[in-house]
Amino acid sequence: MLRIYNTATRHKEEFKPLEPGLVKMYSCGPTVYDFPHIGNLRTFLFSDLLVRVLERRGYEVHNVMNITDVDDKTINGAQREGVSLSEYTRKYTEYFMEDLDTLRIKPAWEYPRATDHIEQMLNVVKTLIEKGHAYEHEGSVYFDISSYPNYGKLSGVVPEKHHSRQFGRLDNDEYEREDVRDFVLWKAAKEGEPSWDSPWGPGRPGWHIECTAMSIEYLGATLDIHLGGVDLIFPHHENEIAQSEATTGQEFVRYWVHPEHLIVEGEKMSKSRGNFYTLRDLVEQGYDPIAVRHLLMSAHYRRQLNFTREGLEQSEQALSRLWDFVDRVREVPNGADGEDVSEQVDRALTKFDAALDDDVNIPGAMAAVFELVRDVNPLLAEGRLGANGASRVLEFMESADEVLGIIEHEKGSLDEEIDALIEERQKAREAGDYARADEIRDKLLEQGIVIEDTPQGPRWRRE
């Protein structure tokens, strides 16, 4: 039984989709004005992990992740570079998709772009005006929060009890967490900005309206799961609820899921502190992107993650041990006799699934994997793991990796010079020239190649 923490109720709840067998899930995607940083990627990675867990439980998942390609940031970026909005955002959308692929994040069901759904947004705004939830002012359209009594039910931020038109309006896309005013649905055109025709004159959509329009377009009035960073609870998700439920008259979201913030070396990440990292920064510095994936999911999604270089190096070491273990299990000869490890594998599988069912506890699931490695390693070292046991272990690892995405790896190949050294060392050992064999071993180690002697012959791994 999968249980998920619902931000709206502040409790873990048994997950039951509205339609049996099908999960309708909306994930707030990137604003494509720059490379995504590792804090963004933690949220997108958790969306991937949640989809994988749901699929493991037998659900078909329709996961929609929007691409915000028109807002203050994208417009300012395009103007700064002197290119069209579409040219500017297309470039960063491609970078985003490349980063997802590098981190082994599976593609979403749909990636709708805001600028491709202007008509749907205009229809929502028209409906809100007709129902008395929105009004036009000088070519812009605002949501009247006094018309929606439940405003604040997700975040707890409650507006003052007087008419919000007297309270003021907000035109910018982002604002302070406690700033509660009528928010903009449609912005009147400004000189030099891209615009689209509307019943209220030329303009462009506000930030919040896109998610309502596109979630209704692809998933209908009610979503099973809405996911986004904890920083989006207010105002973005609060405004989504108001405008969506005011439009359809139905419950907007049944389960709200919010991954926590990421900090770097104990501090808030910022360019001014010099601790601002993109995935590309880390890869260029020589870190394995799968180690980045491992570290980003090493803390439960509702806990703040402290991203450190030491932690990244520890992730690389943990993965190296895991990959080496899997390689050695694969080398167990067919037909080899050995001890039964069914009990160890069954115990690992039980712990793995129990962790996933407990609010998608990925660190707990990874612990079950490494516990199995610890239990089986002595059998491997002593040559006591048989073919049947190896098959069970590999079956579990393959199943676990369908969720984790960190176990499968390409060992790579060695250049001819290193191959020749390994062969020379083996011949030296066979001739009893152990001094020469040790000399070659040390030379290989200087090049990052570790040699292990096994009953099946020498095997290598990268340090």
Image (tube, grey):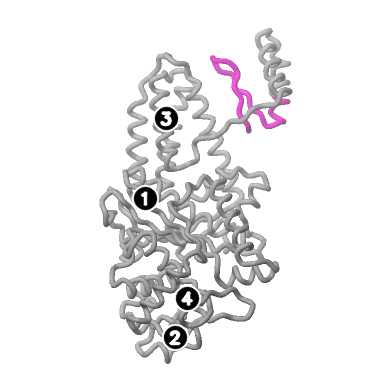
Mark 3: give few (<14), some (14-19) or many (20+) Cα within 10 Å: some
Mark 1: give few (<14), some (14-19) or many (20+) Cα within 10 Å: some
Labelled disc at residue 136: 2
Q: Earlier in the sequence, mark 2 or mark 1?
A: 1
Report x, y in % for residue 106: 47, 47
Q: Which of marks 4 and 1 is nearer the N terminus?
A: 1
User: What type is the residue that disc 1 sits on?
Assistant: Val
User: What type is the residue that disc 4 sits on?
Assistant: Arg
Nearer the observer, 90 or 227: 90
Inter-mark Cα distance, 4 to 1 = 32 Å
Is residue 355 shown in magenta?
A: no
| Region of the chain picked out in magenta, as a range | 442-463
Nearer the observer, 415 or 186: 186
Nearer the observer, 443 or 237: 237
Identify the residue under disc 3: 375
Count of marks placed on residues: 4
Labelled disc at residue 399: none
Q: Mark 2 touching mark 4, by CB under 8 A?
A: no
Camera-near label (2 vs 1) is 2
In this image, 264 relative to 114: left or right?
Answer: right
Inter-mark Cα distance, 2 to 1 = 38 Å
Inter-mark Cα distance, 3 to 1 = 35 Å
Q: Quadrant of residue 335?
A: top left
Camera-near label (3 vs 1) is 1
Identify the residue under disc 1: 61
User: What type is the residue that disc 3 sits on?
Assistant: Asp
Q: Which of marks 3 and 1 is nearer the N terminus?
A: 1
Identify the residue under disc 4: 177
Q: Quadrant of residue 348?
A: top left
Dot 3 lies on which element? helix
